[in-house]
Image (cartoon, grey):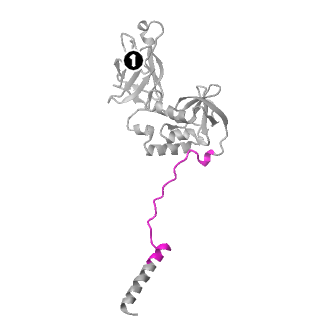
Amino acid sequence: MNRKHAVLLLIVIAFILTYSFAFTGYVTVPERETIPPTLSCTAPEYRNISGETVHVTRVIDGDTIVIEGNERVRLLGIDTPEQGQVLFAESAAFLRNMVDNKSVILERDVTNRDKYNRLLRHVFLNGTHINCVLIKSGFAKTLVILPDEKYSEHLREAEHMAQQQQLGIWQYETIPDVFCVGISQFRYNAWGNDNENLNGEFVTFRNFCTYPVDMTNWVIHDERGTTFTFPCFIAQNKTRFTLYTGAGSNNETALYWNNGWPVWNNDGDTLKLLNPSGTPMLDYSY
């Protein structure tokens, strides 16, 4: 064998050894980053559910449905926007699309009914936990009230995922108090003559948050542009306060517009509530 042939043989041997090592695992390949599994609302935890099968006849909002017999059912472990708040209509439409006019399974936790006599239940459709889906899709926040904490860990995981992805309500997380203030009662048509019963026309608000909200310089206006600017006022957590159209002395639970004529149209109107920077906090029509 001459020198040229010897060199070629060495090159071939080196080539074979290199690829042999590659295929037998001796070549180091960077490991892939471990990706945590995506939380599923049809996880094994839901395979042994026990409850009654019912038919959904109507969806009221994002967390309340009506079943046969005109029973109202409040979905456990979740809280969706109130009427007039951002994403109220979207959350209701999302739930309506999933369960309206369908048969679902209702599973009880500890408490049977709430103070409004609504059934408290986890709702399942074809093995899917609807409560979980609403949270995971960003249409609801977790609201676990003891002793009803079944699936609470799973719901909080779903919330964490939605928050990380900035889905739905989490897009508005930078706006302070955006999901705090809602309307509890709207008496737009006073008893008797509206012009003679101005304080019979009122709006009762509620602070749904667990902390006080400073509403100083927030502004309300109707479709005609009649405005009310809040004086120095703190809406206490989980409490109601009422804005009357007529005259009176302001206190912690009552404010007065001091308007000389009725504000709200009896045949339909819109209430818009803006914070001091002009950001819409409520857009409520009737």
Please, what secondary structure does the residue beneath circle 1 have? Answer: loop
Position of residue 3 relative to residue 89, above or below, is below
**In the image, what residue occupies the spot 64% across and 28% down?**
68
Which residue, given by chain and number where applicable, does mark 1 sit on?
250
Position of residue 128 relative to residue 227, above or below, is below
**In the image, what residue occupies the spot 64% across and 46% down?**
47
Query: Does the image show residue 76?
Result: no
- Relative placement, left or right, of 130 versus 187 is right
Q: Which residues are magenta?
A: 18-46
Position of residue 10 relative to residue 132, above or below, is below
Q: Count neighbours of disc 1 (C-alpha within 10 A) and say few if under 14, some if 14 to 19, many if 20 or more.
A: some
Image location of residue 27, percent across then percent down: 45, 72
How many numbered discs sit on the rendered protein?
1
- Relative placement, left or right, of 156 versus 12 is right
Query: Does the image show residue 136?
Result: yes
Q: Amino acid at mark 1?
A: Asn
Looking at the picture, tell me which residue is in the foreground, 195 or 234: 195
Q: Is residue 21 magenta?
A: yes
Which residue is at the far bottom? 1
**In the image, what residue occupies the spot 45% across and 6% down?**
193
Looking at the picture, tell me which residue is in the foreground, 241 or 33: 33
Q: Is residue 230 magenta?
A: no
Which residue is at the far left? 277
Image location of residue 175, percent across then percent down: 38, 35
Image location of residue 260, percent across then percent down: 36, 10
Main SS of the magenta segment?
Answer: loop
**In the image, what residue occupies the spot 47% across and 33% down?**
90
- The quadrant of the image that shows the N terminus is bottom left
Image location of residue 170, percent across then percent down: 43, 39
